[in-house]
Image (tube, coloured by chain):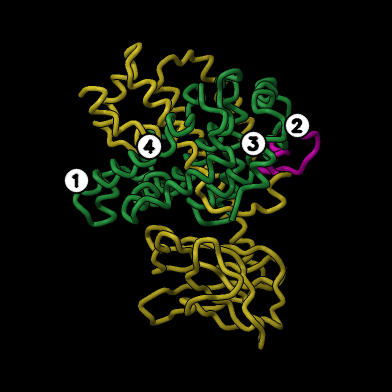
Chain colours: A green, B yellow
Amino acid sequence: MTFLPLLFAIYVGEDDRNLAERLKRREPAVMGELYDRYGKLAFSLIYRIVRDVGVAEDLVQETFLRVWNRAQGFDGERGALGPWLLAVARNRAIDYVRSSGGKMTRGAVELEAAEHPSVFVNFEADVLSQDRARRVRGALGRLNENQRHVIELAYFEGLSQSEMAERMGQPLGTVKTWVRTALKNLRDELGEKAITA
Amino acid sequence: MSCDELRDQYELYALGVLDAAERAELDEHLHREGDPCIEGVRRARELMASLALIAPESHPPARLRAKVAGMVGEPKRAWRWTPVWIAATACLAAVAVWLNLARHDDQRALARALLDAQRKNVEMARLTEAFALMNDPAAKQLVFGEGAPKPRGRVFVNPKQGVLLLASNLTPAPSGKIYEMWIIPKGGSPAPAGLFQSGADGTAMYLRKGAVDVATTGAIAVTLEPEAGSQAPTSTPLIVAAL
């Protein structure tokens, strides 16, 4: 499976800066264009987390509406629109799963902070590029099973290290080692040095 | 702790999954001007943003674009919940300005309340659809798993509205797997009817919208499949409800 058509759309379509400015001017037509650019990726991400088409559909709408409502706080010059929108999508989905699992309170504040538009500034332009996608999948594929599992639990389920340890039935120290090693490997392969090399 | 010691926490902070004590410690660094942790967290956010690309590609329903595009400013459209929440958002924003809410905690609480209301509204919409399907006299009710330890529940087949599954004792599908519904014609091959997940408490409500030919349908079934779904069942059905 591939996001090639989506990534193609991202790179040949209107640039994000222009879309962000139009969002801030509250031009209704921009919502359809924003969806064309990021709708499929947002849906895929949300669906991976909630695993229910109907819920994913609702949460995609909630995501775009939230971006529309918060666009005034977005830095159109330095901001990374795609990563921000996908962070909102991920957080909406994780928040939904937590609330339906009776765990609504934990993490709500962290998720709010993690998706504030002001934090998505000065990102590399290729964060969602085709080459980046290939390298992310490659780097993840080179992690061992436990390391990959903890990364997926953190990213797709929003679990803390303590929660991962409980879920996996492993000592917290062991889980922290897996997480630390996995993140170091990802950093080494995908971090700034690897990008510019 | 020093920035070096906190380095392993940057990505978890960026993902919003640090435990409270760990988060508070890093927050202190992020409030210090020029602290190296600030740039570290920025890079971590960049790295974590790329993880969205590992989600398997899924195809959103074609109607979703129109729904998103129509949420704001479309001149004429049927009544639905989104405009109400746009209005609610505007009202709450106005109230926030009026009260001059300077404290972040207050703003977060306000945003939290709005989101909770939105979520409840989404759930209410799904329940309303489910009740409409069940209450239609044309709906046919099937029971499965009676007397069995798990899973058990009911399937409602409505010729015009679709198939509604209500199940309990259905363990959440493990990582990499998902439940898939099948509509099985009499004497024919199962046709895929959508993917769903059960809740942590083992309950599931899944509505597959669309007309169903009750006369030619033999059974509704559910199997455990790879998370991208399958075109034909690859495992033994966990649920079978015969018409």
Q: Which range is magenta?
A: B67-81
Q: Is residue B31 above or below residue B243?
A: above
| Lower position in the chain sequence, tag 2 or tag 4 | 2
Amino acid under disc 1: Gly
Q: Residue at x 35, y 12 (%)?
A: B34
Task: Indicate the position of residue A11 as horizontal and vertical percent values.
Answer: 67, 35
Give the residue number, with chain letter if any, for mark 2: A29
Crowd rating for badge 2 (residues with CA inside 10 Å; few <14, some 14–19, many 20+): some
Badge 1 and badge 2 in a common chain: yes
Above or below, comparing residue B36 to residue B56 in the picture: above
- Residue at the disc numbered 1: A173
Q: Chain of mark 4?
A: A
Share a chain, discs 1 and 4?
Answer: yes
Distance from the alpha carbon under mark 1 to that under mark 2:
51 Å
Quarter of the image that includes the N terminus of chain A:
bottom right
Mark 2–mark 4 distance (CA, rounded to whole Å): 41 Å
Residue A188's label in the rendered image is: 4
Q: Which quarter of the picture shows residue A78? A: top right
What's the amino acid at mark 3? Val
Q: What is the chain letter for disc 3?
A: B
